[in-house]
């Protein structure tokens, strides 16, 4: 029987880590190993975690960062398949069993949807990410080879094949200085098929300290700088490994929408930062190139996104400071922004 390792990464989440551990232990799949890596917490996390010690594997390390924590977690685990569960999230009981039902030989990972909940566990009715119906492994590969990106979810929504992970681990904490799940997702199509479940199998908690999700009150242009720096490192690594594996990648890559959005934000708000394109004009050229090449999206979706990018490029800064926090919030989106987002999503 296939064995799954659920590796829980914790740092100062004493109020949430108990739920994460319980959800891992409650999986209906009978062969599940639970590993908890505490990355130098200074709250009461250790006392919470140690109450489960007879049922889990524990690692308490000095603060080394998220990337080093996942390195330690993979090294301590033994399952043929691995899911990295953030300590502020949790899985639904049938998550592993449902993912295994989709698994085929040669797969690098299975990805699935998550509910979005608030700090108290209330459902915010913002299921993510949006996967089109019938989103196939072939479509994942097409988008990946064109842009080095495809729709994926945060770490909690991915079950990875260990044979894939061992080819890219240990991750370099200098290059991948944050959000190691991003590089695991980006590189996966180079090592095997990526299969997608349009099914909600866990919950992502928005509580104000998330790396990925934001609320209107905590939006900051520095987020764009950090993500663009990380993207540049990940894109370079993607190209290096594609070349090593003789996998043909589009040259030059089409910049995905997310990268274009961050590039424009950096150019408008923090132009002194040495990341991204050299000029706004060059970025706008890339925006129109993306519009022409991203045929996997509907015309209405591409037009809506293109309009948003042009708006970012030319709207007054004062207006952008009012609009962006609402547009980019995962928790506090207005009806207008929900409707706008709906235009970018293909319905079938």
Image (cartoon, rainbow, N blue to C red):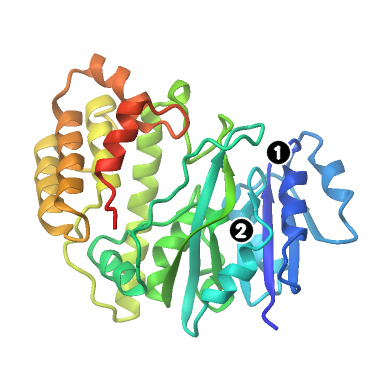
- Residue denoted by label 2: 84
Q: Where the C terminus falls, by quadrant?
A: bottom left
The part of the image, by quadrant, that contains residue 186 is bottom left
Q: Position of residue 84 (x, y in %)?
A: 61, 58
Looking at the image, how many numbered discs can be counted on the residues?
Answer: 2
Q: Counting other residues with Cα less than 10 Å from the Cα at mark 1, is it few (<14), some (14-19), or many (20 or more)?
A: some
Q: Position of residue 50 (x, y in %)?
A: 87, 49
Q: Residue at x 72, y 66 (%)?
A: 28
- Residue denoted by label 1: 13
Q: CA distance from mark 2 to mark 1?
A: 15 Å
The image's mark for residue 63 is: none
Q: Quick check: 325 left or right of 106? A: left
Q: Position of residue 44 (x, y in %)?
A: 81, 36
The part of the image, by quadrant, that contains residue 337 is top left
Residue 274 visible in the displayed image: no
Q: Is residue 34 above or below residue 13?
A: below
């Amino acid at each position: 029987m296939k064995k799954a390792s659920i590796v829980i990464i914790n740092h100062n989440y004493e109020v949430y880590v108990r739920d994460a551990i319980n959800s891992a232990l409650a999986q209906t799949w009978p062969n599940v190993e639970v590993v908890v890596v505490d990355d130098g917490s200074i709250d009461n996390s250790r006392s919470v975690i140690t109450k489960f010690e007879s049922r889990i594997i524990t690692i308490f390390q000095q603060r080394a960062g998220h990337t080093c924590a996942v390195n330690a977690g993979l090294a301590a685990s033994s399952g043929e398949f691995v899911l990295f569960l953030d300590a502020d999230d949790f899985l639904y009981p049938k998550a592993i069993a449902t993912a295994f039902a989709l698994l085929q030989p040669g797969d690098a990972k299975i990805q699935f949807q998550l509910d979005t909940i608030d700090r108290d566990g209330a459902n915010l009715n913002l299921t993510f990410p949006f996967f089109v119906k019938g989103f196939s492994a072939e479509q994942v590969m097409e988008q990946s080879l064109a842009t080095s990106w495809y729709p994926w979810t945060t770490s909690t929504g991915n079950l990875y094949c260990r044979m894939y992970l061992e080819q890219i681990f240990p991750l370099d904490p200098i290059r991948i200085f944050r959000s190691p799940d991003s590089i695991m997702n980006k590189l996966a199509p180079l090592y095997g098929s990526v299969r997608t479940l349009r099914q909600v199998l866990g919950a992502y908690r928005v509580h104000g300290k998330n790396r990925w999700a934001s609320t209107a009150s905590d939006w900051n242009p520095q987020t764009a700088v950090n993500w663009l720096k990380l993207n540049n490192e990940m894109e370079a690594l993607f190209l290096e490994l594609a070349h090593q594996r003789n996998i043909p990648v589009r040259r030059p890559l089409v910049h995905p929408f997310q990268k274009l959005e961050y590039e424009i934000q950096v150019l408008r708000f923090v132009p002194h930062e040495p990341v991204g394109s050299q000029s706004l004009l060059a970025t706008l050229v890339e925006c129109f190139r993306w519009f022409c090449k991203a045929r996997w999206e509907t015309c209405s979706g591409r037009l809506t996104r293109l309009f948003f990018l042009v708006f970012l490029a030319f709207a007054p800064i004062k207006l952008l400071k009012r609009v962006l926090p609402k547009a980019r919030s995962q928790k506090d989106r207005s009806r207008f922004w929900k409707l706008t987002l709906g235009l970018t999503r293909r319905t079938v």
